[in-house]
Amino acid sequence: MSSAAELVESAKKLAAFQAVDEHLLPSHRFVGIGSGSTVVYVVEAIVAKGPSFYGAMSFIPTGSQSKGLIRAAGLTLANLDERPLVDGRLVQLDVCFDGADEVDDDLNLIKGGGACLFQEKLVAVAAKKFVAVADYRKQSSRLCTKWKTIPIEVLPLAAPDVLVRLQAMGSPTPAIRTGLPSKAGECVTDNGMWIIDAPFPPLLLPKDLAGEAEGAGKDGVWEINRLARELLSIPGIVEIGLFHGFNGAEAVSLGKEGQAQKPVAAYFGTAEGTVDVQRAK
Ligand SMILES: O=C(CO)[C@H](O)[C@H](O)COP(=O)(O)O
């Protein structure tokens, strides 16, 4: 491994270990485990705490990779729909840890680089608290700055029409993700869908508009919440890799438990061997 790659790996590990230390409590019973290479270290950090700490916990995966991680680590696996009912409602996950492709100033995320965004969103919204773990390359002030495309999960049958609709919205070159080099043809998700990667110029935050909501989307420059709404209104789009809106703590005050997509904090391992924690204000 080159030294640059080693720096990135150790940054991921530092972020994951600190996030687990600060957010996983022995009283927790249901824990979401996201997908990607950083989450590998989340599982490692949990295992390092020992069976007396995690033995009573069940771990909810966000796809086949994280299911494999949970199993290989000897942790108790439970599917999202197997949580017990309390007062007629499925119990919320205590916490969910997941990676991100880009994180903006307000903790909005782009996810889906590993094509797991749909189940990742289902697990994130089912959690009281979502915590993002990443390395320093993922931090940016506005989404679509470094990670320039939004991953979109689509029904294969609808993909050609969705591509046309995306172009009409101002995404210049949306493309169906291929499975190459490991699979010829399209990248097929854990849900049997395809992924379209749609480039957009850097997205505005609500605060950028300063009351000028009419301008959102004008000249192909979108405000994040409005873009998310427009994308989800396109028939054939199953889910999008924008995680936006509000976090778990804000959901409680808004009376919108079960709808929070944003993390309460993002942990970024740095190249200097420290961890930069971006917390919700
Ligand atoms: O959203 C994801 C998968 O769909 C991942 O969490 C995201 O791509 C980050 O992955 P990594 O930790 O490997 O950088």
Image: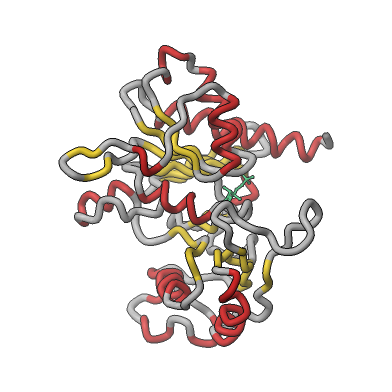
- Count of numbered circles in the view: 0
What's the image's color scheme?
A: secondary structure
Where residue 33 appears, as percent x and y from the top left, is 49, 38
Q: Is residue 59 above or below residue 47?
A: below
Query: Please, which residue is most extreme toward the right here?
Result: 2
Q: Is residue 222 above or below residue 42?
A: below
Q: Is residue 281 visible?
A: no
Query: Please, which residue is most extreme toward the left here?
Result: 87
Answer with the quarter of the image where residue 210 lies: bottom left
Q: Is residue 175 visible?
A: yes
Where residue 30 appears, as percent x and y from the top left, is 36, 33
The quarter in which the N terminus is drawn is top right
Residue in the image at 61% along x and 31% along y = 13
Where residue 8 appears, as percent x and y from the top left, is 70, 39
Residue in the image at 48% along x and 51% along y = 119
Q: Is residue 173 above or below residue 93?
A: below
Answer with the quarter of the image where residue 65 lies: top right
Q: For this rendering, which residue is in front, 17 or 80? A: 80
Residue in the image at 60% along x and 84% along y = 164
Q: Is residue 73 left or right of residue 57?
A: right
Residue in the image at 50% along x and 44% along y = 62
Q: Is residue 91 left or right of residue 195?
A: left
Query: Please, which residue is most extreme toward the top here?
Result: 52
Answer with the quarter of the image where residue 244 lies: bottom left
Q: Is residue 271 above or below residue 235?
A: above
Where residue 272 appears, as percent x and y from the top left, is 66, 35
